Image: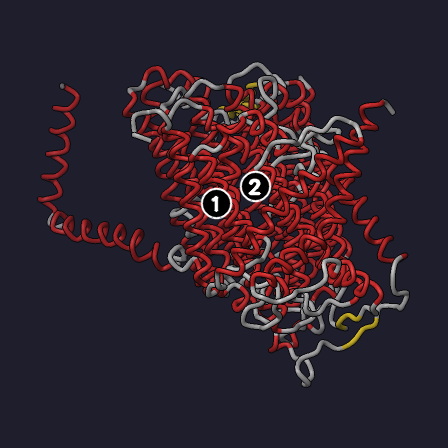
Amino acid sequence: MNHDTLKHLTLLLIHLGLLLLLSPFIHIYIKKIKATLQGRIGPPVLQGYYDLAKYFHKETVVSNQTSWLFSITPFIVFSTTITAGLLIPTFSSKEFIVPLGGVILFIYLFSLGRFFMTAAACEPGSSFCSMASSREIMFATLIEPVILLPLFIFVCLYGTNNIFEIVNQLSNKGITLYTPTYVLSLIAIFIASLAEMCRVPFDNPETHYELTMIHEGMLLEYSGKQLGIMFLSSWLKQLIIISLIANLLFPWYTTPDFTLASISLLGVIYLLKVLVVSTLIAFIETTVAKVRLFRVRDILMASFIMSIIALVISVYKGKGLGI
Amino acid sequence: MVLETLLLKYSFLVFVLGAISAYLICIRSKAISIVASSVFAIIASTLSLISSIFSLTHQHSYILSYHLGFPIGKLELVIDPLSAFFIFIISLLVIPVSIYSIGYLKAEYLEKNIGLLCALYHLFILSMLLVVLSGNGFQFLIFWELMTLISFAFVIFDIKSTESKNAGFIYLLMTHIGSAFLLLTFLIFAKYTGSFSFVSFNEASNLMPASLKAILFLFILLGFGTKAGIVPLHIWLPEAHPAAPSHISALMSGVMIKTGIYGILRFIFDFLSPFPSWWGIFVLLIGITTAVLGIIFASSEVDIKRILAYSSIENIGVILLSIGASMIFYSFDQKILAAAALVAALFHSLNHALFKGLLFTCAGSIISATHTRNIEKLGGLIKLMPKTAFLFLIGSLAICALPLFNGFISEWLTFQSLLRLYELKSDFIKLLGPITASILGFTGAVCAAVFVKTFAGIFVGMPRTHQVNHAKEVSPSMSLGSSLLGIMCFLIGIFPFLLFPLLNTAASFTIGLENINIQSAGNVNNNFVSISPLIIFVIILLSFFFIYIFSKIYGSKLPVRKEETWSCGIAPKAEFEHTPTGFSQPLGVIFSELHTPESFYHNYIYLPIVNGLINLSHKMRPLQSGVLQIYLLYIFLALIFCLVWIKL
């Protein structure tokens, strides 16, 4: 094995380790900030890890109506999510070994996980699970075009499908990067991402009430280890999306040298970027109320129109339209 | 004689022999007739499959002509990479469907006229092969009609039900409107070139004025679009496909509607090029409309075969999207990009044939086991029919264009083509590319919703009626046929590059390029396109095993306990679950504006035309006075008119 491949593999392992280890922390961090803003103390910072350990030590009970599909789903959701995690840069925007795929694969891997999750949620025959599943799949039809269009704008502007490459090109632009097209697209991505991460104003990750639940509702019949894996996957997905936004927002400091100092420095910078975006999410969650189920369309459509405006600006820039 | 033409000839011979022998054997024994018919069909389509692979790898074009005597005259066949590719698709689907049909016909049609069904099956496949091979407009129409009429016979095979009769009537009517436009097109071509031969059609483009070409373009879209099922010409499709036997539905949805795509490609790229860019934009817009509306219609259906028929409409839309992109690139003289977009279209045609074949055969298995097409009445079949459930799941994942399966690869290529429209120097097209691409993402998501609903409705939860309880797993030949299709869907999803040589040849021939490696040629100037399905598969597999082993080692060692689902203290009942209709209700609410019922097309598009025609014929009625002298006057006037016309 030559030296370069070894380097890439090391970076890959650090990348995976960061995603897996950081995701429970970020989930609790958002909760903690929200609690602080609301004048509560909030959970201890390590609560996410305690929770996972608790789920893994509990007995797993499944409904007797379920089949192999229900039991296999947590593993599939986890593996598709972590694979999607390989398609985005975290602390390093260097490609891992070979190009794996771009934005389309990234979004479609989440869809693959969602297909299994929604189908399996209907298995126990509980009305709460199937309702949540039906709502989740309806949301997906709204989220997918809205998150794809702004990503496509980046793809078209930078002539590449690869998210690593997009971030590298963005970082070369320096501070001139914040053009109107860029800002509008990023806002659109951010809004759609909130929905994809199942957060307020689209879904409330804190409740199990049947009127509000969407993502959590699908997990109702899971228990023990399976539930633990499901939670880990959804926290992982949240961190992956936050990392994507963070690296699009601050694309700098993502090309480490292969030294311990450089890698740990960029690791800290990456953590800071993620914390900034997470704090922003916590602020939004405390100031905005969850919208009615069928009003979700209006918010997402607004975000879609924002990205269309971004596209129009990028096409007609400097062509005498006064933009 | 060259090998591939010889193979093709033998394959035709075997199809004819198969038709005759199936009919004759049926007089003695129905069971033997079914097996014999399938064996003949498998041998014949294997021959044509090998022949098509040969002609694609050798990139030969042949023109064959046989003298067949009076009704047909000289039979002209053209084998070139484009027609060879469609032969490849047809033959590839026919093999597993024939295996499937052994068990299916035994289970469902034993008391019906098996001999006729099997004989027509052979003739149907033969007519599809001859349509794509035809090198003469006149014969093309004959084979086209033959294909339509035989499939019409399948649609009305269950003649006792009024549903079949209605479906057959609409099918016949719509396809004949389509054929009328084709006839008109061919006549106009023949007027300019003086011959019906496709070879002479090639020169027609230089002879015609631009306006006439535009009219012909619309005629071609109407004619072939009716067959392909573009919205709003699709109304026959959801009626006719469910009415036919399931293995025939697989062929009709999988390959018969693709002959429409073949016709569009053949006429636009071969006979009418060069063309202006608005043609491409027009096709692109039709494609996106068809894709969106097709899948939205499917979302509220509960009849499994109608869902599949509507999803065929969506997939035709996706294919037209990449054809439209290819036409736009072609008109901007970006031939490599045009070929790349065409690869997406051809690849999706192939993939759709495979996964739609898989889904229709599974649907046939489900209907055969439960005797209902209504998914509201099913549920819980995953335990009774585990193999079919697994295969249906693979088909659903493939049709939703999810990674690891073949649908993803071709839809991914379609996305790439649409996004690269941004590189062209036209503001409108720059806007069009990314927006249509994101709407394609939308259809993918709705498709996932539809197939989660269908899969969950059929297989998951508790049985909603007693019909389900006595369902059994289907016979081995049916499972084998579906499994072959499932394996192909998966293998193409992991190793798509194995098919690229064939696709490249067909696409670059159609565009008129030397055969080059389109994938790498498109990559030279930038690294826009890159994906590694095999590595993705390996990574998913590794992480799957990682978390599986981790969860086995770490934490509680207690075995998994099975308990009844908690339903607030009462015993769980099937009524507690969401029905498929309930499941897709939020989707229906969100997209209620898009959700035009079928009656919309009848009331606002077809009825006005029909009423107009009836009014017109009422106005013409006074001409038919019934008085002999008046008729003689007509003849006299017509004669004078003709004489004057000739003199002028």
Q: Could you say whether the residue bearing mark 2 is in a helix, strand or loop? A: helix
Q: Position of residue B319 (x, y in %)?
A: 51, 38
Same chain check for tags 2 and 1: no
**Residue depicted at 18% across the width and 49% down the height:** B616
Question: How crowded is the residue under tag 2: few (<14 C-alpha within 10 Å), some, or many (20+)?
Answer: many
**Residue depicted at 54% across the width and 16% down the height:** B513
Q: Please, what is the three-letter code of the amino acid marked with disc 1?
A: Ala
Query: Relative to the observer, which residue lies in front, A134 or B73?
Result: A134
Q: Please, what is the three-letter code of the amino acid marked with disc 2?
A: Val
Quarter the N terminus of chain B occupies: top right
Rendered image: mark on residue A67? none
Query: Relative to the observer, which residue lies in front, B472 or B28?
Result: B472
Q: Is residue B90 left or right of residue B435?
A: right
Quarter of image, res B6: top right
Chain for disc number 1: A
Given contact means CB atoms under 8 Å apart, are the residues at marks 2 and 1 in contact?
Answer: no
As measured in the structure, the alpha-carbon distance from the residue carrying label 2 to the one carrying label 1 is: 40 Å
In the rendered image, which residue does mark 1 sit on?
A188
Q: Is residue A82 visible?
A: yes
Quarter of image, res B127: top right
* Residue A272, above or below B377: above
* Residue B498, above or below B248: above
Q: Position of residue B293 (x, y in %)?
A: 44, 50
**Residue depicted at 43% across the width and 57% down the height:** B591
Quarter of image, res B644: top left
Choose mark 2 or mark 1, whichever is in front: 1
Rendered image: mark on residue B255? 2
Q: Position of residue A46 (x, y in %)?
A: 75, 58
Query: Relative to the observer, which residue lies in front, A159 or B74?
Result: A159
Q: Could you say whether the residue bearing mark 1 is in a helix, strand or loop? A: helix
Chain for disc number 2: B
Q: Is residue B606 left or right of residue B63?
A: left
